[in-house]
Image (cartoon, helix red, strand yellow):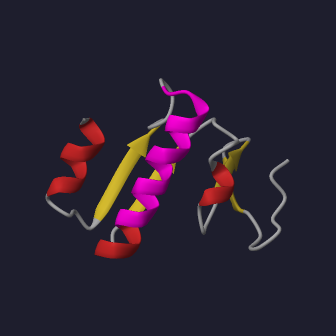
């Protein structure tokens, strides 16, 4: 419900902190697909903070924080290790 509330006004940016944490794998991927679809349809930026490695490949850009430093992952075929 909180995700739906966040999308209803078509904001320019959606900040999602662990949006899939309480969900099983199938529902988690469904939520991420919805976020990605809304981002494309309404030209909304989606910033997701997660520890869920399964959803990471669904995003176009990925940044990781290691030892306090932010690193951008490579594009297609990026390493997720």
Rendered location of residue 66, percent (x, y): 73, 44
* For residue 7, above or below residue 53: below
Q: Does any portion of residue 30 appear in the rendered image?
A: yes
**Nearest the eye: 66 or 8:** 8
Rendered location of residue 38, percent (x, y): 35, 64
**Nearest the eye: 79 or 55:** 55
**Res 11 → quadrant:** bottom left
* For residue 55, above or below residue 52: below
Rendered location of residue 79, percent (x, y): 84, 58
The residue depicted at 45 percent of the width and 62 percent of the height is 36
Residue at the extreme top: 22
Query: In the picture provided, is 21 more to the left or to the right than 73?
Result: left
**Nearest the eye: 68 or 75:** 75
Which segment is the magenta one? 23-38
Q: Does any portion of residue 70 appear in the rendered image?
A: no
Residue at the extreme front: 26
Residue 32 on the magenta span: yes
Query: In the picture provided, is 4 more to the left or to the right than 43?
Result: left
Rendered location of residue 74, percent (x, y): 77, 70
- How many numbered markers are drawn? 0
The residue depicted at 61 percent of the width and 67 percent of the height is 61
Q: Main secondary structure of the magenta part?
A: helix
Query: In the picture provided, is 15 more to the left or to the right than 58?
Result: left
Residue 37 on the magenta span: yes
**Nearest the eye: 27 or 47:** 27
The residue depicted at 41 percent of the width and 56 percent of the height is 35
Q: Which quarter of the image is occupied by the N terminus? A: top left
The residue depicted at 65 percent of the width and 51 percent of the height is 56
Residue at the extreme left: 9
């Amino acid at each position: 419900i909180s995700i739906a509330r966040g999308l209803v006004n078509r904001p320019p940016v959606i900040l999602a902190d662990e949006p899939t944490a309480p969900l099983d794998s199938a529902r988690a991927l469904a939520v991420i697909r919805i976020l990605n679809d809304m981002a494309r349809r309404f030209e909304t930026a989606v910033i997701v903070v997660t520890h869920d490695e399964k959803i990471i490949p669904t995003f176009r850009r990925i940044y990781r924080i290691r030892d306090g430093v932010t690193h951008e992952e490579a594009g297609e075929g990026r390493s997720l290790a």
